[in-house]
Amino acid sequence: MSVERNLPLIRERKQAILKGDEGRLAEQKKLGKLTARDRVAMLLDPQSFVELDALCGKGAESGVVTGYGLVDGRAVFVYAQDYVQAGGAVGAEHARKVLKVMSMAQKTGAPVVAMFDSTGARLLEGVNAVDAYAQIAAKTAALSGVVPQVALVLGQCAASAAMIAAMNDVVIQSEAGRLFVNGPQLVSANTGKQVTSEQLGGMEASSATGIAQMTAKTDAEAVALARKTVMLLPSNNLEDAPTDFASVDDVNREAPELNVIDTVGDIKEVLVKVADAGSVLEFSAEYAPEMVIALGAIGGRTVGFVATQPSVDQGSLTVKGSAKAARFISMCDSFNIPLVSLVDTVGMAIRCEKGQGKLARAGAQLISALSEATTARIAVITGKAIGAGYIALASRPTQDVVYAWPGAEIAPLDAPAAVQVLMEDELKGIDNPEQKRAQLEQDYQDNQADGINAAQLGYVDDVIEPAETRMMVAAALEMLATKRDARLPKKHGNLPL
């Protein structure tokens, strides 16, 4: 049979595959959701998608669209569960297609974007369906730290799929997404309380637990966030952080308005002024707001920002906040992304009467993550760096370069606590203890805790004008661009997870 006679048959079969189930297609549209191929097309550069295995096996029954394309001219592999085809159910053929693109991503050193929207396992396949999840999970773990992995939860993502999504470097969830391990029927039956899928794993629930780093109202907004994330990340762990040499934001741009700030109210305002205009992409904004983490750029070079938020519990290092920062630091270090820490913290959280062990472990996670990081590390102390806050985020062992703003306070205890602990006897029996307390606090801050004192001792590289923060950080990044850090040989450290 000639090629020409075969073409109509091939086209007809492809059209049948692409069409999908009419009922599920109508359901997707009713929920405001896009089809798998629409989502992929929106993620990738126009006309760059090359689909793989569209005719494989029984075609539509695989329930997943796989292939590769370009994001801003760089190769990206993608698999998108196709709800209109067999409900996107996961079975052996589904897993085979997914594993193929993940293996190709590993060989070529390209990111993987996964789009989750499935009714779950293909139950008729029995243990084969369970093994399908196990194979995908194992491959996700193998690629961790090798190539960036971004998960988009755009529909149901339950049980094993939820754990696979959580294994990705970044999770983005739409309003229609549902991310949970145990479904509402099972939870309701075991607790005696009626719960909905939205309460268990809706967008707000995922934000509150920190499982989703970013959320979006629509599929289109979620895909746009994934595209920006991929553009800020390198293609693999052997590449340096992306650099846009055409960046129009001058690295020597000053921010004179920072010079008139007595105390920082919102660290995000400082972060935005330090980063290139429009480059900041914050992660987990609603989860542990006392700690701010974000990707951004300085002079066109991607950096990871870790900042304590003084307006929330004085920037205390909490269990959730420390773990949130530690995982972000680990991701940035995996992909050679420089870290910039903006520090204004009173140290470990005090209002934690129970679970002190959890607090110690979380603090250990943060210190371990920064100590083990071999990427460039720069800290700017914008306010207080007290006790464990200094050790974790602004000390010489965890940073390559440390700057401080005028008036920065660096000490084992902040001034009020130091007076309370060390000088209480001087306040007994005097007529005006409050005036004396204020004087002692000021003397302590000026003579022992001041950033200039730390600079004289060599713990701070320089006390800089706030307006020059961007310029000084950019210079340090340029100096550290060729950093090579030799470590003791070992398989890996035993992190306090």
Image: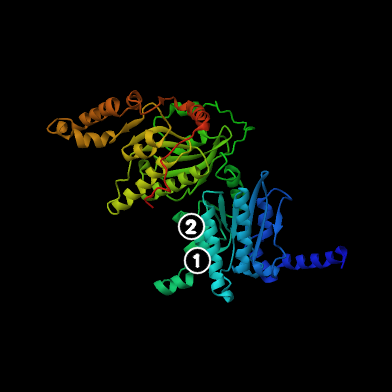
Quadrant of the image occupied by residue 307: top left
Circle 2 crowding by C-alpha within 10 Å: few under 14, some 14–19, many from 20: many
Q: Quick check: 269 left or right of 364?
A: right
Element type where label 2 sits in the image:
helix
Badge 1 element: loop
Q: What whole-number distance in Å separates the C-alpha atoms at marks 1 and 2?
A: 14 Å
Residue 137 % position (x, y): 52, 60
Q: Left or right of 25: which side holds 290?
A: left
Nearest the viewer among 474 and 406 is 474
Looking at the image, tell me whether mark 1 or mark 2 is earlier in sequence order: 1
Q: Quadrant of the N terminus?
A: bottom right
Give the x, y percent position of residue 231: 61, 44
**Looking at the image, can residue 116 be seen?**
yes
Mark nearer the viewer, 1 or 2:
1
Dots 1, 2 in contact, CB < 8 A: no
Q: Residue pushed farthest bottom?
A: 124
> Can you name the residue that lies furthest to the top here?
456
**Rendered location of residue 407, percent (x, y):** 36, 27
Number of marks drawn:
2
Position of 173 relative to 300 (above/below): below
Q: Is residue 221 visible?
A: no
Type of the residue with mark 1: Ala
Q: Nearer the viewer, residue 132 or 258?
A: 132
- Kind of residue sitting beneath label 2: Ser
Name the residue beneath numbered marker 1. Answer: 159
- Residue located at (53% from left, 43% from top): 335
Identify the mark at residue 206; answer none if there is no mark: 2
Rendered image: mark on residue 147:
none
Q: In the displayed orientation, state which residue is furthest to the front.
A: 489
